[in-house]
Amino acid sequence: MIKKIIFSLIFFILLVFCLLQLQFVQNQLADYTIRSQIFNTLIENPNMPTEDTLSALICGSRSPVVASTERAETCTMIIAGNDIFIIDVGDGSVNNLRNWGVPFDQIKAVFITHLHSDHISDLADLHLMTWVSKLPDKKSKLYVYGPLGIDAVTAGFELSHKLDYIYRNRHHGDEIMPLNNAGYISKVFNEGNVLKFSDSELEVRPFTVMHSPVEPSFGLRFDYKGRSVVISGDTIPNDNVIKFASNADILIHEAQSNYLVDLARDELDKNDSFLSKIMSDIKTYHTTPKDAARVAKKAEVSHLILNHLSPAPDSYVAKKFFSRGLKDIFEDWTIAEDGMMISLPVGNKEINFSKFNR
């Protein structure tokens, strides 16, 4: 009986192998695979909110310290009603958005908290997706809000991609990729500004944080119909975050485990790597998980999300080290993951978590 089963399995495997050599079978499999891939890329994700909510999608959860195959660099997508806003756009984040079927034509603006490369590196890819996705009568340049210096950043991207704009316009034409809508409209914000957008009840309040020598650096508070999300930006613990995060539903705060950073530094020291100095330097301008919990407690927020994780804790053991002692300070916290969606329905105090994927 066992011999018959083994013989049948071997016969089946050989049959499948032989079938896969046939061009007709290969064509059918290729057709199915490509159609599925295109469908998933072009069709809007069914996880987009259908009710009136203020939502935050983590589209990148790591810092540039130590690579991770599971995470993109820092990026958060805010959804207020039918409008989408992107906050920071680090390496790999736009690929996440594309794979998840985010409707790029609904993106109203980008906010950059500060001008470190891991917060702006995917800006050109995001521009390309919004440029090609919008209908002809709704095409416009990409609005980018940021601190002093954002004009130079967007001008630099436009200069480096000038020929790309021309080539794509020649190839696809004015209806799809008009040159007059290529590029950016940059807007400098400051603390005290209240940014509002047409046909939206969303209000955005920038506030300064401490990330020296990167000055100015900002956090952002988003208020929509009684619900609120605050993003700390990169910062050491400071009272301004507590002030602007006061009574917020969600505080998305950067977090760095200095214990794990020290382990990385010690390993680099063994190899006489100059990178060990970087590991020492970064301890001066970030916030530990415990300090982020203390900020959340003082601000009396409902839930804390640890983000811009440095180094990103991908294993079970690393997450335990990263979060050690947090519950002794603040009960309601979560370590961010790429694809984590936090939804705040309008009209109540619910905080709903879901996974934003296919």
Image (cartoon, grey):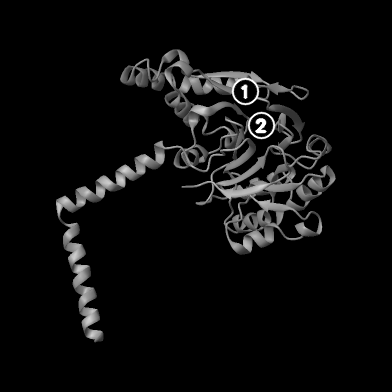
Residue 107 located left or right of residue 345: left
Q: Residue at x 77, y 58 (%)?
A: 327
Residue 204 located left or right of residue 291: left
State the residue position of label 2. Answer: 113
Observer able to see residue 231: no
Q: Of marks 1 and 2, which one's residue comes earlier in the chain?
A: 2
Amino acid type indicated by mark 2: Thr
Say which of 140 and 92 sits in front: 140
Task: Give me the disc on residue 64.
Answer: none
Q: Residue at x 35, y 40 (%)?
A: 38
SS under mark 1:
helix
Q: Residues within 10 Å of mark 1 (few under 14, many from 20)?
A: many
Percent coordinates x, y for residue 349 in the rendering = 74, 43
Contact between labelled residues 2 and 1, with CB atoms less than 8 Å apart: no
SS under mark 2:
loop
Which image quarter: residue 58? top right
Say which of 263 and 329 sits in front: 329
Residue 114 located left or right of residue 172: right
Percent coordinates x, y for residue 261 in the rendering = 66, 53
Q: Residue at x 74, y 46 (%)?
A: 287
Percent coordinates x, y for residue 48 in the rendering = 53, 39
Residue found farthest to the top: 180
Residue 139 vs 121, above or below: the answer is above
State the residue position of label 1. Answer: 150
